[in-house]
Amino acid sequence: MRLPASLLLLAAAAVAAGATTLEKLSVEEMVQQSTAIVRARASAAATVQRGSMIYTVYRLQVSEVLKGAASAEVYVPGGTYGRYRQSIAGSPVLEPGVEYVLFLWASPRGLVQVIGLSQGVFQLKTASTGEALLVRSKIEAEFVDRQGRAVEDSGMKLSLSGLRELIARTQARGEAQ
């Protein structure tokens, strides 16, 4: 849970500074750090204010749990609450009816959030071969590696079957330790 908390601190600091800097995560790191990975559609959204942060809360219709336990909602930093608006680069926007695979984690306060902001949101698409693919476009935000060096995001694509295999390997390694 160390990295998701650090990402939250980076996002909170970025709100004050007016920019967002994220640590670039691999799919394997997202699998390891997620408390849940679900296949879901967003059905509705509302905004709430918690302290100085505004969140868009998406209701989820979960069709499959790939890891952990399903959550009925996910909190995404940013949104409009009353006459106040917070905009955070890298925060995902979930479109109603679109099928996603979401890498989720529960914050110390119990808010279920997406790992790495938009890094943990993949649209589910079907390849011409009929294979289910997870696709994430390039994210417009500043990224750094573990050493703090600037790196680029170029988007990501992987198969749903490949993700299932990675989850199984990661869980098997965790049980063996």
Image (cartoon, helix red, strand yellow):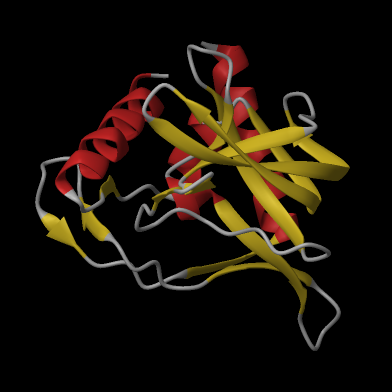
Front residue of 72 and 148: 72
The residue at the point 58 percent across, 14 percent down is: 176
**What residue do we see at 67% from left, 56% from top?**
162
Pick the residue in front: 113 or 145: 113
- Viewed as shown, does residue 7 lie left or right of 167? left
Residue 95 x %, y %: 70, 64
Image position of 56 (left or right of 98): left
In the picture shown, does residue 77 fall above or below 123?
above
**Position above or below: 148 against 121:** above
Q: Quadrant of residue 143?
A: bottom left
For the view shown, which residue lies furthest in the bottom direction? 128
Image coordinates of residue 129 in percent, x first then y, are 82, 84
Where does the image place residue 117, in percent across and percent down from the top left? 45, 47
Q: Quadrant of the N terminus?
A: top left
- The residue drawn where x is 33% and y is 34% is 7
Identity of the residue drawn at 67% across and 65% down = 123
Quarter residue 65 falls in:
top right
**How many labels sit on residues?**
0
Left or right position of 85 against 122:
left
